[in-house]
Image (cartoon, helix red, strand yellow):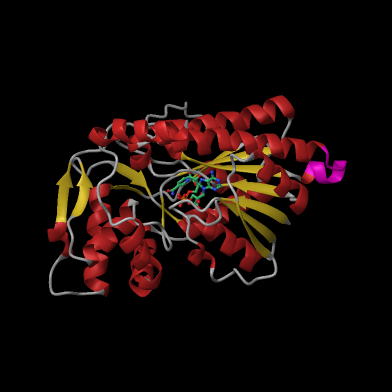
Amino acid sequence: MRVIVTGGAGFIGSALVRHLVRERGWDILNFDKLTYAANLQSLSAVSENANYRFVQADICDAGAVNRIFADFHPDAVMHLAAESHVDRSISSSAEFIKTNILGTHVLLEAGRQYWSDLPSERRNAFRFLHVSTDEVYGSLADGSFFTESTAYDPRSPYSASKASSDHLVSAWRATYGLPTLITNCSNNYGPHQFPEKLIPLVLLNALEKKPLPVYGDGRNVRDWLYVEDHVKALTAVLERGRIGETYNIGGRAPTENIAVVERICDALDALAPNGETRRSLITFVQDRPGHDRRYAIDPTKIETELGWHAEKTFDTGIAATVEWYLNNEWWWRPLRDDVYSGTRLGLLENSARADRHLSENSV
Ligand code: NAD
């Protein structure tokens, strides 16, 4: 298999590339713009492999995207490149609209052109897998779960941009027959996650004895999935998923944010005791605007149709994650010192200014 992975220097993309290069031996082309969220250090385990190559380019650049298709001759595209942080989308939405919507459109058009020129056998085998999020479904009532037929109701700039891209992908299937697949996955965590997201942010703040910010009352629920389980699910969908279908991916682990933070504290106290209890650092802060209350995935379809199941429980996944961050300061220290130190993002006071600044700079 020859596969273009977009966003392969990000958190999930790099886990996917490592998996496909090492475990599957596929030829992988990592197509990534290298935004603040990218880190080529996450690919050091595969960067010398003959079946791995990297191209730095923007998915919004149609010329670059067309060249990659023409030069690499892929059998599939796994599309993960995106702006991915909800809080940043509240402060400044323009890049989300550009990359997540317009970039996906560029990729679909280039993919369609390339696919329609393929000889019939390769055309039949070609796949375009679009990686999306459960956040497109909006906020759930207690006791209910997202299925593949849940109506879209995105409520943040991030989830609205991902919902738009999902609709584009479905339209390219219906209108042009492009062999697409869509996955909607719950919140991921694990090694190599940029420390703006809840779990690494809390973990690193706790190590540095800084306050552990919990939004609102801490009772918002997210359904956590270990990243290596996610990449195995994506591989299963690419290989065995039915064309045109959507697959929800989740680890059956809906957990309140406050419980997530407490578990990280307890795991750190056990693995790296410092004579204090880290729970004392927990600090409730102003809630995120429009904060969805509950996400929970019903993964029955992918489990029964494709035989995929999450292998890690939340407890084993958190323990592995805490251990990884403890042992890999070389990876996260430069990010904390030079890229993002953990300051609060996504409050409304700053958002008008941030977007005005961006649009002034983009004309
Ligand atoms: P990430 O922010 O860690 O990585 C995104 C990657 O995309 C980065 O390497 C970045 O450089 C690249 N990128 C951004 N804009 C680009 C552009 N214009 N051209 C080329 N590359 C570009 O994101 P992640 O957490 O790894 O998420 C990957 C995908 O999975 C996203 O599409 C996201 O919506 C989806 N997803 C994420 C989660 C999660 O919990 N993190 C859950 C479900 C779905």
Q: Quadrant of the N terminus?
A: bottom right
Asked whether residue 342 is drawn in magenta, I would say no
Query: Which image quadrant is residue 286 in?
Result: top left
Q: Position of residue 301 (x, y in %)?
A: 55, 41
Residue 321, position as x, y percentages in the image: 37, 65
Choose between 280 and 66: the one closer to the eye.
66
290 vs 80, left or right, is: left
| Residue 193 in the image: above or below residue 83 | below
In the image: residue 72, left or right of residue 328: right
Q: Compare residues 303 and 49 and report the one nearer the observer.
A: 49
Depth order, front residue of 99/307: 99
Q: Which secondary structure type mostly characterizes the magenta part of the structure? A: helix
Q: Which residues are magenta?
A: 117-124
Residue shown at the point (80%, 41%) measured from the top left: 124
Answer yes or no: is residue 309 visible. Answer: no
Answer above or below: position of 51 versus 79.
below
- Residue under the point 38% across and 37% down: 89
Q: Position of residue 36 (x, y in %)?
A: 43, 52
* Horizontal arrangement in the rendering, residue 68 relative to residue 163 (left or right): right
Q: How many marks?
A: 0
Residue drawn at x 78%, y 45% as measured from the top left: 125
Residue 354, percent from left and from top: 33, 36
Q: Does the magenta run of residues contain 121?
A: yes
